[in-house]
Amino acid sequence: MSDYSSADISKKVSKLENEEAILKWFSPYRGYGFVEHPKIPEDIFVHFSVINKSGCRCLEPGDKLLCDIVQKSNGYQVTEIYKIDHVSSDNAKTPTEVLEGVVKWYNPAKGFGFAWSEDKKEDVFIHSSIIKRLGIYNLAPDCKIIMNVQRSHNGFEALDITLTG
């Protein structure tokens, strides 16, 4: 039996390196989510910038992250991701598709926007990190684009775009 309560253990854990954490949820619209780790009794914050730096665009609940976790003044936070094992019901990654689209709106202050895919008759989410890689910081409505997209639990999400007009 341990001499420490879970609260005592969480106070003693200030940094975990190369640890496996399980994704509880992630929202690309909000730009953050939370993971859980058996040594830490509270939710652990993970920001989009850390996920983006790992090269990943879509996460689903249950995905396993090999990561560093640090205790900050406002709680625990993932600071580095080394590997992501995607877990899905069919154990397969969601395939990507190339679609033509038109920008409906984009708000640089919010860091996201949407394009309309005529092929799918659906909106496609576009995060600011996608267009910043192109050296662009805003998208004009009605701008024609080609998108490499992937379906997430919230709908289609652009992984890459090319401006066509």
Image: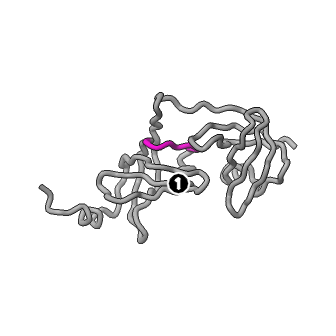
Q: Residue at x 57, y 32 (%)?
A: 94
Magenta-highlighted residues: 56-62
Confirm whether the magenta stretch covers residue 96.
no
Residue in front for this viewpoint, 139 or 43: 43
Q: Residue furthest front?
A: 121
Residue in front for this viewpoint, 88 or 146: 88
Q: Residue at x 58, y 56 (%)?
A: 31
Q: Residue furthest right?
A: 165
Q: Main secondary structure of the magenta part?
A: loop
Side (left or right) of 129 relative to 142: left
Check the image and report above or below for 134 versus 12. Answer: above
Res 111 → quadrant: bottom right
Mark 1, residue position: 50
Q: How would you rate the neighbour count of disc 1 (Cα within 10 Å): few for under 14, some for 14-19, many for 20 or more?
A: some
Check the image and report above or below for 86 versus 51. Answer: above
Q: Residue 88 in the image: x percent, y percent?
A: 47, 34
Q: Residue 74 in the image: x percent, y percent?
A: 43, 69
Q: Residue at x 41, y 57 (%)?
A: 44
Q: Residue furthest bottom?
A: 73
Q: Residue at x 47, y 28 (%)?
A: 90
Q: Quadrant of the C terminus?
A: top right
Check the image and report above or below for 27 versus 149. Answer: below
Q: Residue 76 in the image: x percent, y percent?
A: 40, 62
Q: Amino acid at mark 1?
A: Val
Q: Quadrant of the N terminus?
A: bottom left
